[in-house]
Amino acid sequence: MSRSILLLIISLFSSFLPMLAQERKTRQPVESPQGKIAKWLDLTDTIPVFQGVNVTTDMVGPGWYALGGDFLSGEVALEVNLLKRFFPILEVGYGRTDAINEDTELHYKTDAPYFRLGLNYNMQYKKRLPGYIYSGLRFGYTSFKYNIDGPSMVDPIWGGELPVRFEDVKGNAFWGELLVGVRAQIYKNFHMGWSFRYKVRLNVKDSPNSTPWYIPGFGVSDNTTFGATYDLVYQIPWKKR
Amino acid sequence: MRKLLSCIVLILALCFGVSGCESGDCMLSSESYCSMSFVDAQGKSVKLLDTLSVLVNLNEYDTAYVYQCDTDVIITSAPVDSLSVKGYILSLLVERKQGVLLNRMTGANELELPLSFTAECDTFFFQYSARLSDTVWVKHQNHPYFSSMDCGTVMHYDIVGVKSTTHLIDSIQVVSSDVTNISKENVKIYFTVNN
């Protein structure tokens, strides 16, 4: 049933392709687009589309903070296993920092939830191994407030000084992530793995007085940054038909 | 498997390649200056033949000691007890300190002038010679700006108006109102050019 639904969605999505093919007016025998997509998706396989749901949590965020890092983040994710090949995933987390720079004596504080939506792709799906290498894509979003305070700014020419204190500055950020990772079965339904992530800032709301320095879920704000996760995965028991 | 590894290596190379173009370094300048260019009526760059000094009244104040006896007036920067003994009457004069931003520059065709962190209007005295000078007023809003934890804070400004006297200056115009630590032309000063 679920396989039929997936094929139906793919068929609807690709229904415009025959019109394009007709315009080319080629007389060569052409395989139908639905057939091509089905072939690419390897839907000739006999396994059910829905293969279960996994719950994952990242250990790098809390671990990094425990080792003395300035940033604390914790997240859980829910991923759906389709054909043991496609894993749509929703990651929900919470990031915070309360950092002071010793050189500039600036203090930055923020904490906020963040969300990521994306897909993992099992690059070894044909091998049917308990562990696999995967690549993935994420789109993340967070809306947050932050506080900044520090030493007053002293005017070196005209004289006088101005206090530096920005409170409850509103910001939001939208970013993308490319990732590669591995998963391995540890015991029955428990799996572990890691992922290495390349993050690209797509849009960040600045204020007239500041650019957010730390963005929950993204990290220190730069155009690009890297991240890593070490995942504990629990595969929710599911009765296979 | 080889194809898979190639794919991973390609993704990582792309990641590092792109990130290699990025820089988290601070800007070279942490100060914001109002950049002024000198032009003639046609908008062509001109060089001043006279020397140019720029003086300002700073936000700090100096106290002057004024001793007066009949029509005789003596002004000192420190109290002089002997004058009081002689019958001089002491009064205090508080005036803004004067600073020199530019001292007798020759061939100037542009300037970068610092704006005040706290005042909303700065006055610049352009002194071409002992007898010839202009006064330029720059009205601005001040925005202290946090750029990052490592780079600290920098002052940004928004110029809301400019005006000047018209001795050697013909007119003055705002080209770009935002003054940041990224240098760009903010104000054009049109000079009266004698053929």
Image: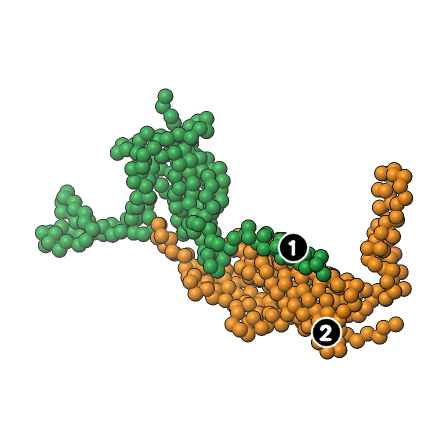
Determine the residue positioned at 45% across, 48% down.
B181
- Residue A55 x %, y %: 72, 71
Disc 2/disc 1 C-alpha distance (Å)? 27 Å
Q: Position of residue A94 (x, y in %)?
A: 62, 68
- The residue to which callout 2 is attached is A185
Residue found at x 45% / y 43%: B183
Q: Amino acid at mark 2?
A: Gln
The residue carrying mark 1 is B10
Characterize the local packing of mark 1: few (<14), some (14-19) or many (20 or more) Cα atoms within 10 angstroms: few
Disc 1 residue type (three-letter)? Leu
Tell me the crowding category of disc 2: few under 14, some 14 to 19, or many 20 or more residues within 10 angstroms, Cα based: some
Q: Chain of mark 2?
A: A
When the figure is inspected, residue A96 is found, relative to residue B72, above or below; the finding is below
Give the residue drawn at x 84%, y 55%. A39
Residue A98: mark? none
- Give the chain ID for the green colour: B
Residue A132 appears in view: yes
Whether residue B157 can be seen here:
no
**Depth check: B12 or B109 in front?**
B12
Residue A87 horizontal/vertical position (percent):
75, 64
